[in-house]
Amino acid sequence: MSMSTPEFSVESLKMLLVVAFLTLTANFIATGTGFVAALPGTALIVVLGLVALLMGRLIPLDLPAFAYAMVLAFELALPFSPVQAPFLAAVGEIDFLATTTPILAYAGLSIGLQTGKMKEVSWKLVLVAVFVFFGTFFGSALISQAVLSAQGII
């Protein structure tokens, strides 16, 4: 059952508004920036997200909506963009880590709702995840060690 574009837009907007509220709350807790100060940047991010989701749905390329969001944000932040200064000032009020909190919570919930599918994949998924986590951690640690040693910091 596929949603029509207006239904998709409304459902996407509802989801983005929940994420925006959670982002505003996390931003206030993390940085002390008030809701009113961060609201313009959050509103821009919600609009960007909705436009990107609609582009991902309507443009016949095999690109995720995230790619469209990145391109749109990049274009708005380019030095020769007429809206660069207000755009960067508005989104500059939002701490990056504050945006990751609701996104990770949403990802965790969506994964939690698919435990039946994960059981079908079995123990192999856990084994691969463990190797990926360890590889990422130790790879990052080795790169950090090399760079910091080369700079004489450690």
Image: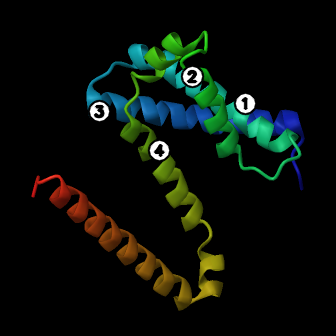
Q: Nearer the viewer, residue 32 or 88?
A: 88
Identify the secondary structure beneath mark 1: helix
- State the separation of the CA atoms marked 3 and 4: 13 Å
Residue type at the position of mark 3 = Ile
- The crowd level at tag 4 (other Cα within 10 Å; few <14, some 14-19, many 20+) is many
Residue depth check, mark 2 versus mark 3: number of the one nearer the observer: 2
User: Where does the N terminus fall, quadrant-wise?
Assistant: bottom right
**Mark 1 vs 2, N-terminal side:** 1
* Place of residue 119 in the rendered image (x, y in percent of width and height, measured from the top left): 60, 84
Say above or below: 20 vs 113: above
- The crowd level at tag 3 (other Cα within 10 Å; few <14, some 14-19, many 20+) is few
Residue type at the position of mark 1 = Val
Instruction: Write down the residue under mark 4.
Output: 102
Instruction: Write down the residue under mark 3.
Output: 29
Residue depth check, mark 2 versus mark 4: number of the one nearer the observer: 2
**Mark 2 vs 3, N-terminal side:** 3
- State the separation of the CA atoms marked 1 and 3: 28 Å
- The crowd level at tag 2 (other Cα within 10 Å; few <14, some 14-19, many 20+) is few
